[in-house]
Amino acid sequence: MASTLDILLSCFAAELNRLDNHLLTLIRNGIPGLSDETELLPDWETDLGLPEECFPLGTTQAQRRLAAHSKYTTKYTGLSEQFFIDLAQSYGATITITQGGGAGTPFRAGSAIDTDKTRVGPTSPVSSPDRRVWSAAQLHVWIVNIAGSEPNLDLIICVFNKMKPAHTLVQFNIS
């Protein structure tokens, strides 16, 4: 004969089993794009800022999952030239970046040397109107050499212009 506890638990068994299966599905959905479930996809799109200029939402669930997964797994290891070369390679493009005719030194804070007016730090008591935080003379120019036949050319240009460092001007040399 079944105990009272057995009878009570058997009443809830089917629902507890469903809950357990649902929790496993949510764990699989912990990283967007890894499962076919779409319950959390709208939340992932909101958290990742999708749609955006470079990554508009696709029309199918698979395209939306791919866009969310791509944005989620992008490794931002630093906004260096190598980062952008690797980023373009992740889209299947081969590029080179050369330094253009920009100016010289990046902006630095906390430096005691303020002779070139590109730094912030201890300054002389006499302030001059030509001391400013930013100047066009401090822009870096990257010339990105890329083939015009690249299938993701428009996406790469969009991503580069959106993610480039603020002091960098990107010029595309499309051959």
Image (cartoon, rainbow, N blue to C red):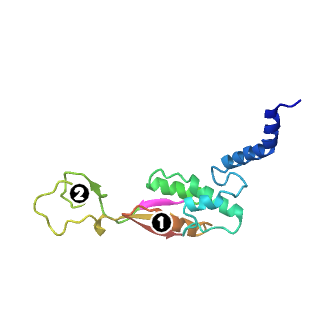
- Residue depicted at 60% across the width and 69% down the height: 56
97 falls in the magenta region: yes
The secondary element bearing badge 2 is classed as: strand
Q: Residues within 10 Å of mark 1 (few under 14, many from 20)?
A: few
Looking at the rendered structure, the kind of residue marked 2 is: Val
Count of number-bearing discs: 2
Q: Is residue 12 above or below residue 117?
A: above
The quadrant of the rendering that contains the C terminus is bottom right
Q: Main secondary structure of the magenta part?
A: strand
Q: Is residue 130 above or below residue 36?
A: below
The quadrant of the rendering that contains the N terminus is top right
Residue that badge 2 annotates: 120
Residue 150 percent coordinates (x, y): 60, 66
Position of 123 with respect to 151 (left or right) is left
From which residue to which does the magenta span run?
A: 94-98
Marker disc for residue 6: none
Q: Residues within 10 Å of mark 2 (few under 14, many from 20)?
A: some
Of residues 107 and 81, the one drawn nearer to the viewer in this rendering:
107
Looking at the rendered structure, the kind of residue marked 1 is: Lys
The CA span between labels 2 and 1 is 27 Å
- Residue depicted at 58% across the width and 67% down the height: 51
Residue 106 percent coordinates (x, y): 31, 58
Of residues 166 and 53, the one drawn nearer to the viewer in this rendering:
53
Pick whichever of labels 2 and 1 is earlier in the sequence: 2
Q: In which image quadrant can residue 10 be found?
A: top right
Residue that badge 1 annotates: 162
